[in-house]
Structures are given as C-alpha cells and as structure tokens.
Image (tube, rainbow, N blue to C red):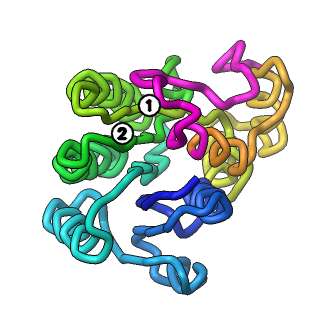
C-alpha cells in the first residue's frame, strides 16, 4: 500500500512490527514513542518523535508537525499501551489505575481527537486502535487494564459512527497473548501473584486458545495493514481478535 501512517508506541514490540509491515507495503512511516533508545534504533528513513500520548500538548504538537511535514495523514495506528498492575482490585492503588487508563484509553482518545480533523478534511483515511482480548472478557487481577481496553472498544465503535459519513473508517484489533518482553513481565507478575511458575502461567494462557499458542507481533501487524488498505474499504466499526481463538480467558492449571 501507499500512504502516510502514524504508529504510536511504534519503536518496539507490536508497534515496531506494524511499522516494519507498513514500511514493507510501501507506506511512509512515522513512529511516536516514549523510548528514545528504541526510537534511535528505528530505520533512518522513518520519521520519529518522542511523544507521551497521555500528554495532550505533546500529542497536539505531534499532529501539527505531521501536517506540516506530510500535508495530511492516511492511517492512525493508536497502539500505545501499558500493562498496568497485576493485583486483586482491593490492592490496586488509584495512582496506578489512573496511569493505566491515561495511556491505554486517554492516549487513544487524544490521538483520535487530533487525527479526526485531518482525516475528515481529506474525506478519507483509517484509524486502527489496539485493544486486547482483555477488552472482550473479564481479566482477573488486571482490573485497570481490562477497564481501559473495554473503553478502547467503545471509543473505536463510536469513532466509526462519527467518521463514516466523512469517508473515514475505524476498527479495533484485540491481540491475545503476544510473545515478547511485555508479556514476559505479565507472566512474571501473575506467577508471583498466583504462586505459580512462569511456565505454568504461560501454558495456561496457551491452553485458553483453540490453537494452543501465543500470537506474534507480525500477526497483529498483518491485520493492521489489511484494515488500513483498500481491501478493507467497507470494513469499519469492527472489533477483530487476533488471538488464536480464545475459548477460556482464565484457564486454571
């Protein structure tokens, strides 16, 4: 595909896989991230910005810079997120709750807020928001994360309704357990909270899918590229799980 694509949290993990996939498809890529070292490791032909998506001033400045440099935007991949605490709800600090929602939900909202006027003026474009299967099922010991990811789905469906008449689509991807450093952190915290080993928790997540395995960043990236493409020109307002088919979101071992 051709086009101008912004990916938040695009310097590592799932976001980096998205950036690589869009680059390979022929798109112009702009990655925003808080990790300066990861940004420095990105290809030099990508545009790169250090941005905290929970900071409205920084997000507004990013989109102003995009308009100045590119004259517009074709795809927003609102992908930034944090895992949040792993704890029973009564043990979750309000500060940790607010931080988790500020990045996962408010970050997506702020990016949509500043992308929408650009896309509406063009009367074309797509938003792809990263949620989680935690936004489709209950998720014990992860109340802030699940709440944020449920909220992201409501945001995405509402954006599809608001923007459709302007020729703009919005869809939500729900990754399952994704191989990589972030999930390793989740596994370690859940193992400690449940008195289990890391491998027991890993096997429990895998056993909760009909395909019996974790997904990889490339699987999420492939879906994002499809949803941004003309092949998905009438796909909007959808919540699509890329998770190996979750059949039991909280398997017990």
Name the spot of residue 31 as percent of width and height, x first.
Answer: 45, 68
Judge from the rendering whether residue 160 lies leftward or rightward of residue 204; answer left or right.
left
Q: Is any atom of residue 17 visible in this view?
A: yes
> For the C terminus, which image quadrant?
top right
Give the number of callouts.
2
Mark 1 crowd level (few <14, some 14–19, many ≥20, 10 Å Cα): many
Q: Is any atom of residue 106 visible in this view?
A: no
Cα–Cα gap, marks 1 and 2: 30 Å
Asked whether the beta carbons under mark 1 and mark 2 sit within 8 Å of each other, the answer is: no
Query: Residue drawn at (63%, 54%), measured in percent from left and top?
Result: 185
State the mark number for residue 103.
Answer: none
Q: Give the range drawn in magenta.
A: 225-253
What secondary structure characterizes most of the magenta part? loop
Q: Toward which corner of the image does residue 158 lie, by quadrant?
A: top left
Q: Magenta span has 247?
A: yes
Q: Name the residue under label 1.
A: 171
Mark 2 crowd level (few <14, some 14–19, many ≥20, 10 Å Cα): some
Name the spot of residue 78 as percent of width and height, x first.
Answer: 40, 49
Judge from the rendering whether residue 43 lies leftward or rightward of residue 233; answer left or right.
right
Label 1, secondary structure: give it.
Answer: strand
State the mark number for residue 92.
Answer: 2
């Amino acid at each position: 595909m051709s086009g101008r694509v912004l990916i938040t949290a695009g310097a590592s993990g799932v976001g980096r896989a998205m950036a690589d996939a869009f680059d390979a498809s022929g798109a112009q890529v702009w990655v925003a991230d808080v990790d300066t070292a990861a940004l420095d490791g990105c290809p030099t032909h990508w545009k790169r910005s250090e941005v905290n998506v929970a900071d409205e001033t920084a997000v507004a400045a990013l989109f102003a810079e995009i308009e100045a440099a590119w004259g517009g935007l074709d795809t927003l991949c609102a992908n930034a997120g944090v895992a949040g605490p792993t704890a029973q709800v009564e043990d979750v600090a309000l500060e940790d709750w607010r931080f988790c929602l500020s990045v996962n939900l408010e970050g997506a909202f702020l990016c949509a807020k500043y992308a929408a006027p650009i896309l509406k003026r063009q009367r074309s474009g797509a938003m792809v928001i990263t949620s989680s299967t935690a936004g489709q099922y209950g998720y014990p010991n992860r109340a802030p994360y699940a709440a944020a990811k449920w909220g992201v789905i409501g945001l995405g469906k509402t954006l599809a309704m608001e923007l459709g008449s302007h020729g703009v689509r919005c869809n939500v991807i729900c990754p399952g357990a994704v191989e990589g450093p972030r999930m390793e952190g989740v596994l370690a915290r859940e193992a400690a909270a449940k008195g289990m080993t890391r491998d027991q928790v890993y096997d429990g997540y895998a056993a909760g899918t009909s395909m019996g395995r974790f997904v990889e960043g490339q699987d999420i990236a492939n879906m994002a590229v499809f949803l941004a493409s003309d092949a998905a020109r009438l796909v909007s307002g959808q919540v699509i799980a890329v998770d190996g088919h979750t059949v039991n979101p909280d398997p017990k071992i």
